[in-house]
Image (cartoon, grey):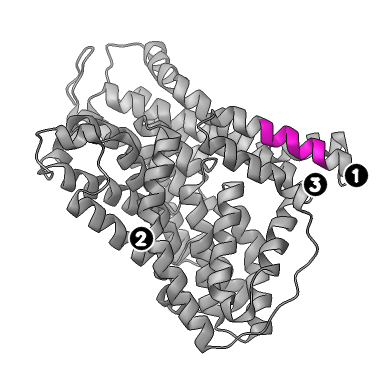
């Protein structure tokens, strides 16, 4: 292996640390899945996998530099302002979700949605409720954990296909994971390619709108043909929903996400204490628990950013971009490939956030080369990663629906209309060059 000084170019060999990570984490996860282990992707923890990959990057390249000098390169990339801001954002997002849940906000959102659904609109209603909840709280996992048991009860009482109800719940949950301005996927995608959060949301909304409308129509037709009984909702209090509304309103106004989350956390605490649903210390403990639930993501963001920085320093990113670029003929193919890479990696590691973290540096390089608006790249990365975890058999949603609702994976997949319509929407927008900015339209580069 040839070594070089600063500006080294190890080419494809520089990607070895990332390959090591994928083999250890994904490879072991797949093997243990086939062997039938419970929680197969926990057998080789992501932290250990990424640590071994980082050590490989530090030890296997550029022997002329000391270990300390290479560690400094890792640390400078791990501690980039954008990465540190991302870490704070995801910690606060976790704190916000738990603070709202502790004072009764999450239950109110669920029950309010259920109270508004007529029985014959149960399927589109489930999709819509999950979409609203996940957009408000910024996490598909929280939505799935909350709504799959509800969907199971609703499908039994209304006599509808459990696979259909489960599919509506899964796809609705990932609707918000893809669109919410406080979701880790949105934050990672926007920050990763340098997109403005508000601009990304607007573009993403226009891409998702036709897919959402078609999905609601299909589920509506399926629900009306299958009948359905009305279901009694639990109690809700509109005041407890105010923190969710505030985050949506302020985020859409273009306020900084960290400030928006801070206001939401404080408002949740104030409402909870005033209503007597929690105490000050109960609120503080809830925020702490939420932050702790997101520590893994913050730590992983630091470690993967440092690893990608080393790989880039060794010339790996430039090599990968050059190889991928050979397959790109213009903006259209660039956008297709960026979204496709995110989808494939997310399907492999079953983690949309991690997939976006790994692919965003490559997408950013390609976007700058072909002068593509960052909001487009962020959207296609986010959509690709979220589609993958909706449809893979080992995804959290599919596994939960199979366990709780007794539906088979094939039946669930056959009822997942939203990801199909979302792919079609992306393909049409990319192929026809729709929704480009004025700057993009004025560029003379090939489409």
- Tell me residue 115's x, y (percent): 71, 68
- Tell me residue 305's x, y (percent): 41, 29
Measured in 3D between alpha carbons, the distance from the residue under mark 2 to the one under mark 1, in whole angstroms, is 43 Å
Q: Quadrant of the N terminus?
A: top left
Element class at badge 2: helix
- Tell me residue 370's x, y (percent): 17, 34
Marks 1 & 3, CB-CB < 8 Å contact = no
Which residue corresponds to mark 2? Answer: 422
User: As displayed, is residue 251 above or below residue 315?
Assistant: below
Please say whether residue 314 is visible from this viewpoint.
yes
- Residue nearest the viewer, comparing 352 with 8: 352
Disc marking residue 199: none
Mark 3 and mark 2 lie on one chain; the one further toward the N terminus is 3
Determine the residue positioned at 42% across, 73% down.
413
Which residue corresponds to mark 1? Answer: 276
Determine the residue positioned at 78% across, 67% down.
234
Mark 1 and mark 3 lie on one chain; the one further toward the N terminus is 3
Q: Which residue range is magenta in the image?
A: 263-271
> Mainly helix, strand or loop, the magenta region?
helix
User: As displayed, is residue 135 above or below residue 378?
Assistant: below
Is residue 267 one of those drawn in magenta?
A: yes
Which residue corresponds to mark 3? Answer: 103
Q: Quadrant of residue 328?
A: top left
Mark 2 and mark 1 lie on one chain; the one further toward the N terminus is 1
- Tell me residue 118's x, y (percent): 64, 76
């Amino acid at each position: 292996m040839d070594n070089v000084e600063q500006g080294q170019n190890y080419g494809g060999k520089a990607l070895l640390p990332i390959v090591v990570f994928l083999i250890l984490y994904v490879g072991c996860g797949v093997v243990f899945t086939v062997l039938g282990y419970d929680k197969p992707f926990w057998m080789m923890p992501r932290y250990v996998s990424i640590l071994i990959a980082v050590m490989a990057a530090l030890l296997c390249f550029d022997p002329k530099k000391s270990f300390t000098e290479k560690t400094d390169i890792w640390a400078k990339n791990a501690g980039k302002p954008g990465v540190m801001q991302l870490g704070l954002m995801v910690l606060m997002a976790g704190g916000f979700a738990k603070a709202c849940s502790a004072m009764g906000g999450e239950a109110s959102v669920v029950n309010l949605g259920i109270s508004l659904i007529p029985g014959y609109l149960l399927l589109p209603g489930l999709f819509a409720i999950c979409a609203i909840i996940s957009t408000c709280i910024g996490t598909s996992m929280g939505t799935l954990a909350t709504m799959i048991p509800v969907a199971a009860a609703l499908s039994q009482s209304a006599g509808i296909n459990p696979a259909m109800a489960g599919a509506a719940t899964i796809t609705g949950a990932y609707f918000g994971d893809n669109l919410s301005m406080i979701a880790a996927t949105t934050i990672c995608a926007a920050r990763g390619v340098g997109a403005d959060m508000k601009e990304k949301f607007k573009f993403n909304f226009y891409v998702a709108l036709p897919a959402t409308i078609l999905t609601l129509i299909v589920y509506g037709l399926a629900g009306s043909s299958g009948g359905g009984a009305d279901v009694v909702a639990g109690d809700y209090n509109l005041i407890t929903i105010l923190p969710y509304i505030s985050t949506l309103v302020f985020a859409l106004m273009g306020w900084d996400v960290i400030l928006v989350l801070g206001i939401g956390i404080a408002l949740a605490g104030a409402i909870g204490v005033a209503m007597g649903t929690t105490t000050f210390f109960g609120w503080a403990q809830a925020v702490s628990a939420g932050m702790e639930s997101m520590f893994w993501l913050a730590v992983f963001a630091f470690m993967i950013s440092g690893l990608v920085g080393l790989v880039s320093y060794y010339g790996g990113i430039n090599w990968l971009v050059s190889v991928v670029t050979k397959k790109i003929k213009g903006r259209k193919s660039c956008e297709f490939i960026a979204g496709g890479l995110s989808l494939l990696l997310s399907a492999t590691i079953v983690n949309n956030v991690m997939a976006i973290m790994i692919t965003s540096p490559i997408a950013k390089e390609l976007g700058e080369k072909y002068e593509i608006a960052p909001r487009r790249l962020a959207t296609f990365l986010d959509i690709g990663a979220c589609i993958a975890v909706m449809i893979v058999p080992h995804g959290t949603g599919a596994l939960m629906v199979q366990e709780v609702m007794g539906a088979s994976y094939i039946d669930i997949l056959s009822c997942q209309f939203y990801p199909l319509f979302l792919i079609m929407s992306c393909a049409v927008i990319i192929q026809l060059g729709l929704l480009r900015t004025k700057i993009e339209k004025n560029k003379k580069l090939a489409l």
